[in-house]
Image (cartoon, helix red, strand yellow):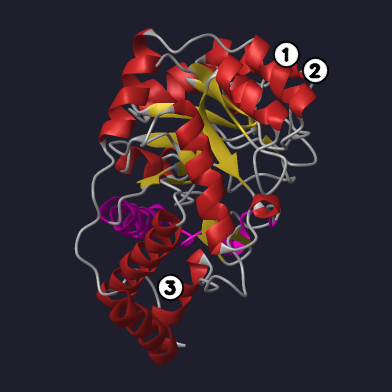
Amino acid sequence: MSYRAFICGLEGLSLTADEKAFLLNFLPCGVILFRRNCETPEQVRSLTQSVRDLLADNNYPILIDQEGGRVQRLAAPHWTVRPAARAYCDACGGATEAALAAAYLGARLIAEDLRMVGVNVNCAPVLDIPAPGSHDIIGDRAYGDDPATVAAFGDAVARGHLDGGVLPVIKHIPGHGRANADSHLDLPIVTALFGELAQTDFRPFHDLRHLPIAMTAHVVFADIDAQNPASASPRVIEGVIRDHIGFDGLLMCDDVSMHALSGSMEERTEAVLAAGCDIALHCNGKLDEMRAVASKSPLLEGEPLRRYAAARACLSAPLAFDAERAEAKVRETLADFA
């Protein structure tokens, strides 16, 4: 089946007739779930299966943001609350063997939660490095404060997802940690020079450039392109993400409905795709906006299609896993070092 270069959200707990018609007519290359779509395990499983049945695609990408901490769409009481990314580093005093092992197991547990309800792509790990004085939108979503620590945890978490049969998405490339605003609400501007960014913010992404999918940052890097946020900047996408960082995987933008971007949904979609993103992401489930995004999203072909196929090919059956033992080990590690 030929899919279009966008991912969309859904309105509620089950597919509406209009959404079924939209998915069949416009064929987005993935669907993303939010808290509004997740009530019980049985309901989420039914929703994801209905999407795949509709499109006759058993491995169709269904995404979610299930980082742990502040960002988890599968929530209590039906799902276990997972630690924030920073908890592993703080509990163990850095990227110790115990901390990395616990982070890997934590990711395996998240992957297990997701796979059981039919979700096969998780928008994690966060590879951003918070800077002093930056907005707290990243905060404890980050694994640490230096490139080596963040890359080490990011690698462990990505492996945990892949071993659990779920694709990880590294974010927010090439770095959101210095942002002076929440890009959901405003456009952050980073004034640090390229040389400094290359030594810090960009490093974890470079170290994990082999991973299959990345999500861009809606952040202006003034020393590289003062006019456009990274998601809509050919200078950032081609010059930094593809060339300097060396990421050749599937590149999706952050949500085009966020207020960091300006213009109509059509204009935003055209801008991110023209800049070099392979896929436009739209999350809020508003059908009129989804139609606007779809109208400017071409069929996947050429390099975007190659990257999409390569990412999907990274999905495999989960390795053998003792979830109960993993839960106990994570709790023990965090408690022992807290």
Q: CA distance from mark 1 to mark 3?
A: 41 Å
Q: Tell me the mark number nearer the camera, choosing from 1 and 3.
A: 1
- Res 334 → quadrant: bottom left
| Tally of marks | 3
The kind of residue tagged 3 is: Tyr
Q: Is residue 223 visible?
A: no
Q: Tell me the mark number nearer the camera, choosing from 1 and 2.
A: 1
197 or 214: nearer the viewer? 214
- In the drawing, what numbered circle is on residue 177? none
Please give the residue where the numbered disc 2 appears in the rendered image: 263
Please give the residue where the numbered disc 1 appears in the rendered image: 266
Query: In the displayed structure, does residue 277 sit left or right of residue 250?
Result: right
Q: Are marks 1 and 2 in contact (CB under 8 Å)?
A: yes
| Helix, strand or loop: magenta stretch | helix
Q: Is residue 115 above or below residue 314?
A: below
Q: Is residue 1 above or below residue 8?
A: above
Q: CA distance from mark 3 to mark 2?
A: 40 Å
Give the farthest residue toward the left: 320
Q: CA distance from mark 1 to mark 2?
A: 8 Å
Q: Tell me the mark number nearer the camera, choosing from 3 and 2.
A: 2
Please give the residue where the numbered disc 3 appears in the rendered image: 88
Q: Is residue 262 visible?
A: yes
**Element type at mark 1:** helix
The kind of residue tagged 1 is: Glu
**Element type at mark 2:** loop
User: Badge 1 local density, few (<14 within 10 Å), some, or many (20+)?
Assistant: some
User: Badge 2 local density, few (<14 within 10 Å), some, or many (20+)?
Assistant: few
Q: Position of residue 49 (x, y in %)?
A: 48, 44
Residue drawn at (79%, 38%) of the image: 186
- Mark sitting earlier along the chain (1/3): 3
Query: In the displayed structure, does residue 333 sit left or right of residue 118?
Result: left
